[in-house]
Image: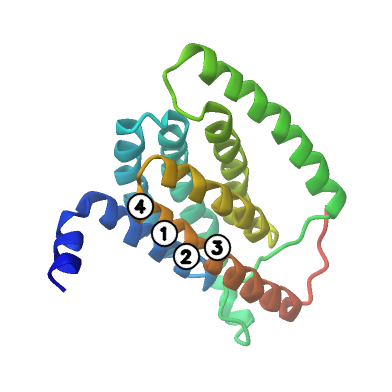
Amino acid sequence: MTETIDYFISLPWLELTGMLLALLYVVLAAKGSIWCWPAAFISTIIYTIIFYDVYLWMESLLQVYYMIMAVYGWYCWQKQQEQVNEHPQSQLVSGITQWSLNSHLKIIVMLAFISVGVGWFMANYTPAHFPYFDAATTVYAVFATYLVAKKVLENWLYWLVIDFASIYLYVQKDLTPTAVLFALYVVLALYGYIQWQKAYKLQGQSQAI
């Protein structure tokens, strides 16, 4: 019992605070609550500092992008929130869309090339650790965050892959609470996809690009 208490006392509380806020963001996003964005904004400030300190510079830069997207996401969701009364059968704010498989495949290939380019730059011109791995998770997360802000259903599938990959990265850097957070993200991404898919079907939308 004493060892357990000592373990929790020794945990980095700044990281734990960022972890809890980031977890709150995903839970609220899965439920379609606009308050997910303030939680995201604060957690990204914390993680910008943490990732910079452990030389995951692409991850740190990603947090700055997340801050900007938190503001953008709040703006987009606020514009749509008044529509929720038109769909009382759904707990989600209306406006969920779906993109075609062909569109996603083209984007995935394009992002893979960008990831290699960014990874090469980081490997040759910065002291960043795991440059290619770090670059790939960052590039795809940038796009997935945009999909969340635009309420594209498939965003949760991107996050499933990103979260699995990120768990390995954070374990290697001894960011245990963050690795646990991303393990929880995997479960929440599945939950979010199921919830949004149900809401999308209820909306009766068939939008695809």
Mark 2 residue type: Leu
- The answer to whether the residue labelled 2 contacts the one labelled 3, judged by CB atoms less than 8 Å apart, is yes
Residue at (38% x, 52% y) in the render: 178
Q: Is residue 38 visible?
A: no
Badge 3 local density, few (<14 within 10 Å), some, or many (20+)?
A: many
- The answer to whether the residue labelled 2 contacts the one labelled 4, judged by CB atoms less than 8 Å apart, is no
First in sequence, mark 3 or 4: give its number: 4
- The answer to whether the residue labelled 1 contacts the one labelled 2, judged by CB atoms less than 8 Å apart, is yes
Residue 24, position as x, y percentages in the image: 39, 65
Mark 1 residue type: Leu
Badge 2 local density, few (<14 within 10 Å), some, or many (20+)?
A: some
- The answer to whether the residue labelled 4 contacts the one labelled 1, judged by CB atoms less than 8 Å apart, is no
Choose between 201 and 50: the one closer to the eye.
50
Residue that badge 2 annotates = 184
Residue 20, position as x, y percentages in the image: 33, 62
Residue that badge 3 annotates = 186
Alpha carbons under labels 2 and 3: distance apart: 5 Å
Alpha carbons under labels 1 and 2: distance apart: 5 Å
For this orientation, the residue located farthest to the top is: 125
Where disc 4 sits, the SS reads helix
Q: Quadrant of residue 7?
A: bottom left
Residue that badge 4 annotates = 176
Mark 3 residue type: Val
Where disc 1 sits, the SS reads helix
Q: Which mark is residue 181?
A: 1
Residue at (65% x, 53% y) in the render: 158
Q: Is residue 109 left or right of residue 13?
A: right
Residue 113, position as x, y percentages in the image: 72, 28
Alpha carbons under labels 4 and 1: distance apart: 9 Å
- Eyeballing the image, is 86 above or below 169? below
